[in-house]
Image: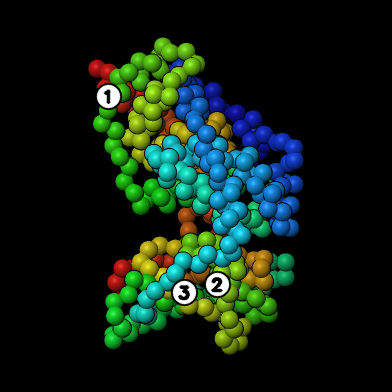
Amino acid sequence: MNDWHEDRTDPAIERIARALRDAPEMGRDVEQRVLAVRRAGGDVPAARGARRRRGWIGAGALAAGVALVLVTGRTRISPDPVAPAPAAAPIEFTVRAPGSSRVSIVGDFNDWDPRANPLTTRAEGVWATTIPLGPGRYNYAFVVDGVAWVPGDADPRALGEEFGTPTSVVTVPSSI
Amino acid sequence: MTASRSLPQTIPSDAELVLRTRVGDHEAFGKLMARYRQRLGRYAWYALGSRDDAEDALQDTFVRAYRAIDQCTHPDRVGAWLFRILINRCRSRQARKSLLVWSRDGDAAYERASVEPVSESAAWREEIEHALRQLPADQREAFLLKHVEELSYDEMHELTGASHSALKMRVKRACGRLRLLLEDERA
Protein backbone atom coordinates (compact mmCIF):
# COMPACT_ATOMS: atom_id res chain seq x y z
CA MET A 1 0.00 0.00 0.00
CA ASN A 2 2.81 2.32 0.70
CA ASP A 3 3.97 3.95 -2.49
CA TRP A 4 5.12 6.87 -0.48
CA HIS A 5 8.82 6.69 -1.19
CA GLU A 6 8.57 6.94 -4.92
CA ASP A 7 7.88 10.66 -4.64
CA ARG A 8 10.42 11.28 -1.92
CA THR A 9 13.41 11.77 -4.12
CA ASP A 10 13.94 15.43 -3.38
CA PRO A 11 15.03 16.33 0.14
CA ALA A 12 13.79 19.87 -0.44
CA ILE A 13 10.27 18.61 -1.08
CA GLU A 14 10.38 16.55 2.08
CA ARG A 15 11.56 19.53 4.11
CA ILE A 16 8.81 21.66 2.62
CA ALA A 17 6.26 19.01 3.56
CA ARG A 18 7.68 18.73 7.05
CA ALA A 19 7.41 22.46 7.56
CA LEU A 20 3.81 22.42 6.39
CA ARG A 21 2.97 19.60 8.76
CA ASP A 22 4.15 21.74 11.64
CA ALA A 23 1.13 24.03 11.54
CA PRO A 24 -0.20 26.11 14.43
CA GLU A 25 -3.18 24.80 16.33
CA MET A 26 -6.39 24.86 14.32
CA GLY A 27 -10.02 24.92 15.35
CA ARG A 28 -9.32 25.56 19.00
CA ASP A 29 -12.97 26.20 19.89
CA VAL A 30 -14.62 24.38 17.03
CA GLU A 31 -16.12 21.75 19.30
CA GLN A 32 -18.07 24.35 21.25
CA ARG A 33 -19.22 26.14 18.12
CA VAL A 34 -20.34 22.98 16.35
CA LEU A 35 -22.16 21.63 19.37
CA ALA A 36 -23.88 25.00 19.78
CA VAL A 37 -25.04 24.88 16.17
CA ARG A 38 -26.20 21.32 16.66
CA ARG A 39 -28.17 22.14 19.77
CA ALA A 40 -29.86 25.00 17.92
CA GLY A 41 -31.47 22.45 15.63
CA GLY A 42 -32.13 22.75 11.92
CA ASP A 43 -30.88 26.16 10.94
CA VAL A 44 -32.59 26.70 7.64
CA PRO A 45 -31.34 29.92 6.07
CA ALA A 46 -33.99 32.59 5.84
CA ALA A 47 -35.45 32.35 2.39
CA ARG A 48 -37.06 35.06 0.40
CA GLY A 49 -38.51 35.28 -3.05
CA ALA A 50 -41.71 35.00 -4.95
CA ARG A 51 -40.94 34.10 -8.51
CA ARG A 52 -41.64 30.58 -9.52
CA ARG A 53 -40.69 28.22 -12.25
CA ARG A 54 -41.80 24.86 -13.48
CA GLY A 55 -39.98 21.83 -14.75
CA TRP A 56 -40.00 18.06 -14.39
CA ILE A 57 -37.63 15.44 -13.41
CA GLY A 58 -37.18 11.76 -13.99
CA ALA A 59 -37.47 8.44 -12.34
CA GLY A 60 -35.18 6.31 -10.27
CA ALA A 61 -35.02 3.14 -8.28
CA LEU A 62 -33.69 2.40 -4.84
CA ALA A 63 -33.32 -0.39 -2.39
CA ALA A 64 -32.89 0.34 1.30
CA GLY A 65 -33.61 -2.54 3.59
CA VAL A 66 -37.02 -2.94 2.10
CA ALA A 67 -36.90 -2.43 -1.63
CA LEU A 68 -38.68 0.68 -2.76
CA VAL A 69 -39.21 1.98 -6.22
CA LEU A 70 -39.08 5.72 -6.28
CA VAL A 71 -39.64 8.39 -8.82
CA THR A 72 -37.86 11.56 -7.92
CA GLY A 73 -38.68 14.97 -9.17
CA ARG A 74 -38.26 18.66 -8.78
CA THR A 75 -40.83 21.05 -10.11
CA ARG A 76 -40.03 24.60 -10.93
CA ILE A 77 -43.12 26.75 -10.97
CA SER A 78 -43.32 29.31 -13.74
CA PRO A 79 -42.52 32.96 -13.00
CA ASP A 80 -45.14 35.29 -11.61
CA PRO A 81 -44.95 38.40 -13.81
CA VAL A 82 -46.43 40.72 -11.20
CA ALA A 83 -44.11 39.75 -8.38
CA PRO A 84 -41.21 42.01 -7.48
CA ALA A 85 -37.75 40.80 -8.35
CA PRO A 86 -36.75 38.47 -5.52
CA ALA A 87 -33.45 37.17 -4.25
CA ALA A 88 -34.71 33.61 -4.13
CA ALA A 89 -37.12 31.50 -6.14
CA PRO A 90 -39.38 28.78 -4.76
CA ILE A 91 -38.21 25.45 -6.13
CA GLU A 92 -40.50 22.49 -5.70
CA PHE A 93 -38.91 19.11 -5.12
CA THR A 94 -40.97 15.97 -5.59
CA VAL A 95 -40.26 12.30 -5.17
CA ARG A 96 -42.43 9.25 -5.69
CA ALA A 97 -41.94 6.97 -2.74
CA PRO A 98 -44.91 4.64 -2.42
CA GLY A 99 -45.12 2.83 0.87
CA SER A 100 -42.80 5.16 2.71
CA SER A 101 -43.85 6.77 5.96
CA ARG A 102 -41.75 9.93 5.86
CA VAL A 103 -39.59 11.73 3.38
CA SER A 104 -37.38 14.78 3.77
CA ILE A 105 -34.80 16.55 1.70
CA VAL A 106 -31.24 17.37 2.69
CA GLY A 107 -28.86 19.64 0.86
CA ASP A 108 -26.52 22.58 0.87
CA PHE A 109 -29.51 24.80 1.57
CA ASN A 110 -30.35 23.24 4.93
CA ASP A 111 -26.98 22.04 6.22
CA TRP A 112 -27.95 18.48 5.32
CA ASP A 113 -30.38 18.39 8.20
CA PRO A 114 -33.03 15.68 7.63
CA ARG A 115 -35.36 17.46 10.03
CA ALA A 116 -35.30 20.82 8.32
CA ASN A 117 -37.46 20.21 5.24
CA PRO A 118 -39.91 17.33 5.51
CA LEU A 119 -41.94 16.56 2.41
CA THR A 120 -45.71 16.17 2.50
CA THR A 121 -47.76 13.67 0.55
CA ARG A 122 -49.56 14.83 -2.55
CA ALA A 123 -51.11 11.87 -4.31
CA GLU A 124 -50.32 8.27 -5.14
CA GLY A 125 -47.15 8.14 -3.13
CA VAL A 126 -45.86 11.46 -4.37
CA TRP A 127 -44.10 13.58 -1.77
CA ALA A 128 -43.22 17.23 -2.30
CA THR A 129 -41.92 20.38 -0.74
CA THR A 130 -41.07 23.84 -1.95
CA ILE A 131 -37.88 25.53 -0.88
CA PRO A 132 -36.94 29.12 -1.74
CA LEU A 133 -33.45 29.10 -3.20
CA GLY A 134 -31.26 31.95 -4.29
CA PRO A 135 -29.13 31.71 -7.40
CA GLY A 136 -26.44 29.07 -7.10
CA ARG A 137 -25.65 25.39 -7.18
CA TYR A 138 -27.00 23.12 -4.48
CA ASN A 139 -26.24 19.48 -3.80
CA TYR A 140 -29.21 17.59 -2.44
CA ALA A 141 -30.79 14.21 -1.83
CA PHE A 142 -34.03 12.87 -0.50
CA VAL A 143 -34.11 10.92 2.75
CA VAL A 144 -36.75 8.19 2.74
CA ASP A 145 -37.95 6.76 6.03
CA GLY A 146 -34.94 8.34 7.68
CA VAL A 147 -32.59 5.83 6.11
CA ALA A 148 -32.28 5.84 2.36
CA TRP A 149 -30.64 8.71 0.54
CA VAL A 150 -32.04 9.10 -2.96
CA PRO A 151 -30.65 11.54 -5.51
CA GLY A 152 -33.03 13.59 -7.60
CA ASP A 153 -33.05 12.18 -11.08
CA ALA A 154 -34.05 15.50 -12.61
CA ASP A 155 -30.62 16.89 -11.98
CA PRO A 156 -27.10 15.71 -12.69
CA ARG A 157 -25.30 13.64 -10.11
CA ALA A 158 -22.85 15.52 -7.98
CA LEU A 159 -19.19 14.91 -8.57
CA GLY A 160 -17.71 13.39 -5.47
CA GLU A 161 -20.17 11.81 -3.12
CA GLU A 162 -19.71 14.00 -0.12
CA PHE A 163 -21.21 11.67 2.43
CA GLY A 164 -20.49 8.47 0.58
CA THR A 165 -23.94 8.38 -0.97
CA PRO A 166 -25.07 9.80 -4.31
CA THR A 167 -26.49 13.29 -4.43
CA SER A 168 -27.73 15.54 -7.19
CA VAL A 169 -26.97 19.12 -8.09
CA VAL A 170 -29.67 21.67 -8.82
CA THR A 171 -28.63 24.94 -10.40
CA VAL A 172 -30.76 27.99 -9.81
CA PRO A 173 -29.84 30.70 -12.30
CA SER A 174 -29.71 34.33 -11.34
CA SER A 175 -32.66 35.07 -13.58
CA ILE A 176 -35.52 32.62 -13.90
CA MET B 1 -9.38 2.83 2.83
CA THR B 2 -7.06 0.68 4.79
CA ALA B 3 -5.72 1.59 8.16
CA SER B 4 -2.43 3.40 7.94
CA ARG B 5 0.02 5.25 10.05
CA SER B 6 -1.78 8.43 9.07
CA LEU B 7 -5.14 7.30 10.42
CA PRO B 8 -4.23 5.68 13.71
CA GLN B 9 -6.69 3.83 15.93
CA THR B 10 -7.00 5.18 19.45
CA ILE B 11 -9.07 4.54 22.54
CA PRO B 12 -12.01 5.00 22.55
CA SER B 13 -12.08 3.94 18.96
CA ASP B 14 -13.52 6.07 16.21
CA ALA B 15 -16.23 3.49 15.66
CA GLU B 16 -17.25 3.64 19.31
CA LEU B 17 -17.46 7.42 19.22
CA VAL B 18 -19.56 7.34 16.06
CA LEU B 19 -21.97 4.85 17.58
CA ARG B 20 -22.24 6.91 20.76
CA THR B 21 -22.88 10.03 18.69
CA ARG B 22 -25.72 8.30 16.90
CA VAL B 23 -27.52 7.73 20.16
CA GLY B 24 -27.22 11.35 21.19
CA ASP B 25 -23.91 11.51 22.98
CA HIS B 26 -22.72 15.02 22.15
CA GLU B 27 -19.52 14.52 24.08
CA ALA B 28 -18.58 11.63 21.84
CA PHE B 29 -18.75 13.80 18.76
CA GLY B 30 -16.80 16.44 20.61
CA LYS B 31 -14.04 13.88 21.09
CA LEU B 32 -14.11 13.02 17.42
CA MET B 33 -13.77 16.69 16.55
CA ALA B 34 -10.90 17.11 18.98
CA ARG B 35 -9.23 14.08 17.47
CA TYR B 36 -9.37 15.31 13.90
CA ARG B 37 -9.62 19.08 14.02
CA GLN B 38 -5.91 19.80 13.81
CA ARG B 39 -5.26 17.61 10.85
CA LEU B 40 -8.39 18.64 8.98
CA GLY B 41 -7.86 22.29 9.83
CA ARG B 42 -4.29 22.17 8.63
CA TYR B 43 -5.33 20.73 5.29
CA ALA B 44 -8.08 23.34 4.91
CA TRP B 45 -5.67 26.13 5.72
CA TYR B 46 -3.19 25.15 3.06
CA ALA B 47 -5.88 24.27 0.53
CA LEU B 48 -7.76 27.54 0.96
CA GLY B 49 -4.89 29.84 1.75
CA SER B 50 -6.66 31.52 4.63
CA ARG B 51 -6.92 30.60 8.26
CA ASP B 52 -10.36 32.18 8.56
CA ASP B 53 -11.65 30.27 5.56
CA ALA B 54 -10.10 27.12 6.93
CA GLU B 55 -11.80 27.56 10.29
CA ASP B 56 -15.13 28.09 8.52
CA ALA B 57 -14.62 25.04 6.34
CA LEU B 58 -13.67 23.01 9.38
CA GLN B 59 -16.77 24.03 11.29
CA ASP B 60 -18.93 23.47 8.23
CA THR B 61 -17.46 20.00 7.84
CA PHE B 62 -18.15 19.03 11.42
CA VAL B 63 -21.69 20.42 11.37
CA ARG B 64 -22.49 18.51 8.20
CA ALA B 65 -20.86 15.37 9.49
CA TYR B 66 -22.73 15.56 12.77
CA ARG B 67 -26.05 15.89 11.02
CA ALA B 68 -25.25 13.11 8.58
CA ILE B 69 -23.56 10.82 11.07
CA ASP B 70 -25.97 8.03 10.18
CA GLN B 71 -24.56 8.12 6.66
CA CYS B 72 -21.10 7.20 7.87
CA THR B 73 -21.25 3.63 6.67
CA HIS B 74 -17.85 2.66 8.06
CA PRO B 75 -17.58 4.15 11.56
CA ASP B 76 -14.11 2.73 11.97
CA ARG B 77 -13.03 4.95 9.11
CA VAL B 78 -14.77 8.13 10.16
CA GLY B 79 -11.52 10.01 9.71
CA ALA B 80 -11.50 9.31 6.01
CA TRP B 81 -15.18 10.18 5.83
CA LEU B 82 -14.56 13.51 7.52
CA PHE B 83 -11.66 14.17 5.21
CA ARG B 84 -13.83 13.53 2.18
CA ILE B 85 -16.43 16.01 3.40
CA LEU B 86 -13.71 18.56 4.09
CA ILE B 87 -12.15 18.15 0.66
CA ASN B 88 -15.52 18.80 -0.93
CA ARG B 89 -16.07 21.81 1.28
CA CYS B 90 -12.69 23.17 0.27
CA ARG B 91 -13.41 22.53 -3.38
CA SER B 92 -16.69 24.42 -3.11
CA ARG B 93 -15.00 27.34 -1.44
CA GLN B 94 -12.17 27.35 -3.94
CA ALA B 95 -14.68 27.55 -6.74
CA ARG B 96 -16.15 30.67 -5.19
CA LYS B 97 -13.02 32.56 -4.50
CA SER B 98 -9.90 33.43 -6.37
CA LEU B 99 -6.78 32.74 -4.47
CA LEU B 100 -4.27 35.47 -4.02
CA VAL B 101 -1.20 35.15 -6.15
CA TRP B 102 2.02 35.19 -4.29
CA SER B 103 4.10 38.16 -5.22
CA ARG B 104 6.91 37.71 -2.79
CA ASP B 105 10.24 36.22 -3.65
CA GLY B 106 10.59 32.53 -2.97
CA ASP B 107 14.33 32.30 -3.31
CA ALA B 108 14.94 32.12 0.39
CA ALA B 109 12.36 29.38 0.72
CA TYR B 110 14.02 27.09 -1.79
CA GLU B 111 17.43 27.86 -0.39
CA ARG B 112 16.29 26.88 3.06
CA ALA B 113 14.51 23.82 1.76
CA SER B 114 17.81 22.55 0.47
CA VAL B 115 19.94 23.21 3.50
CA GLU B 116 17.92 23.81 6.63
CA PRO B 117 17.53 21.15 9.29
CA VAL B 118 14.21 19.93 10.66
CA SER B 119 13.49 23.02 12.73
CA GLU B 120 11.97 25.19 10.01
CA SER B 121 10.70 28.52 11.17
CA ALA B 122 7.15 29.71 10.97
CA ALA B 123 8.28 32.47 8.66
CA TRP B 124 9.74 29.97 6.28
CA ARG B 125 6.56 27.93 6.38
CA GLU B 126 4.63 31.05 5.53
CA GLU B 127 6.78 31.58 2.46
CA ILE B 128 6.19 28.03 1.37
CA GLU B 129 2.45 28.51 1.88
CA HIS B 130 2.54 31.39 -0.54
CA ALA B 131 4.35 29.28 -3.09
CA LEU B 132 1.87 26.47 -2.54
CA ARG B 133 -0.98 28.81 -3.35
CA GLN B 134 0.36 29.33 -6.84
CA LEU B 135 -0.30 25.72 -7.70
CA PRO B 136 -3.49 24.78 -9.52
CA ALA B 137 -6.08 23.61 -7.01
CA ASP B 138 -5.97 19.96 -8.07
CA GLN B 139 -2.18 19.84 -7.82
CA ARG B 140 -2.20 21.58 -4.47
CA GLU B 141 -4.79 19.12 -3.21
CA ALA B 142 -2.77 16.13 -4.40
CA PHE B 143 0.47 17.50 -2.98
CA LEU B 144 -1.06 18.16 0.42
CA LEU B 145 -2.67 14.76 0.66
CA LYS B 146 0.46 12.96 -0.45
CA HIS B 147 3.29 14.86 1.14
CA VAL B 148 1.74 16.67 4.09
CA GLU B 149 -0.98 14.22 5.12
CA GLU B 150 1.14 11.26 4.06
CA LEU B 151 -1.70 9.32 2.52
CA SER B 152 -1.22 6.48 0.11
CA TYR B 153 -2.49 6.75 -3.43
CA ASP B 154 -5.20 4.24 -2.52
CA GLU B 155 -6.38 6.56 0.22
CA MET B 156 -6.12 9.60 -2.01
CA HIS B 157 -8.15 7.84 -4.67
CA GLU B 158 -10.85 7.06 -2.16
CA LEU B 159 -10.98 10.61 -0.90
CA THR B 160 -10.80 12.48 -4.18
CA GLY B 161 -12.28 10.10 -6.71
CA ALA B 162 -9.34 10.76 -9.02
CA SER B 163 -7.48 7.85 -10.61
CA HIS B 164 -4.12 6.73 -9.33
CA SER B 165 -2.38 7.83 -12.49
CA ALA B 166 -4.01 11.26 -12.37
CA LEU B 167 -3.04 11.67 -8.74
CA LYS B 168 0.54 10.67 -9.36
CA MET B 169 0.75 13.09 -12.23
CA ARG B 170 -0.66 15.89 -10.10
CA VAL B 171 1.80 15.18 -7.33
CA LYS B 172 4.73 15.11 -9.71
CA ARG B 173 3.61 18.29 -11.39
CA ALA B 174 3.08 19.96 -8.04
CA CYS B 175 6.58 19.03 -6.92
CA GLY B 176 8.03 20.19 -10.18
CA ARG B 177 6.06 23.39 -10.10
CA LEU B 178 7.14 24.12 -6.53
CA ARG B 179 10.75 23.56 -7.43
CA LEU B 180 10.41 25.73 -10.50
CA LEU B 181 8.65 28.53 -8.65
CA LEU B 182 11.23 28.64 -5.94
CA GLU B 183 14.20 28.19 -8.22
CA ASP B 184 13.01 30.88 -10.61
CA GLU B 185 12.65 33.28 -7.75
CA ARG B 186 16.14 32.42 -6.62
CA ALA B 187 17.69 32.95 -10.06
Question: Mark 3 and 1 residues: CB-CB less than 8 Å, in contact?
Answer: no
Q: Quadrant of residue B113?
A: top left
Measure the C-alpha gap from mark 3 to mark 1: 49 Å
Relative to A173, is B171 on the left or the right? right
Measure the C-alpha gap from mark 3 to mark 2: 8 Å
Residue A24 in the image: x percent, y percent? 49, 31
On screen, residue B83 above or below B10: below
The local crowd at label 1, few if under 14, some if 14 to 19, many if 20 or more residues have their Cα within 10 Å, is: some
Identify the residue shown where x is 35% and y is 39%.
B136
Residue B21 in the image: x percent, y percent? 70, 53
Label 1 sits on residue: B105
Label 2 sits on residue: A117
The quarter of the rendered structure image containing the N terminus of chain A is: top right
Identify the residue shown where x is 53% and y is 41%.
A27
Identify the residue shown where x is 36% and y is 26%.
B127
Chain letter of the residue beneath label 3 in the structure image: A
Relative to A133, is A97 on the left or the right? right
Identify the residue shown where x is 44% and y is 63%.
A138
Label ID, residue A131: 3
Task: Name the amino acid type tagged 2.
Answer: Asn
Q: Quadrant of residue A121?
A: bottom right
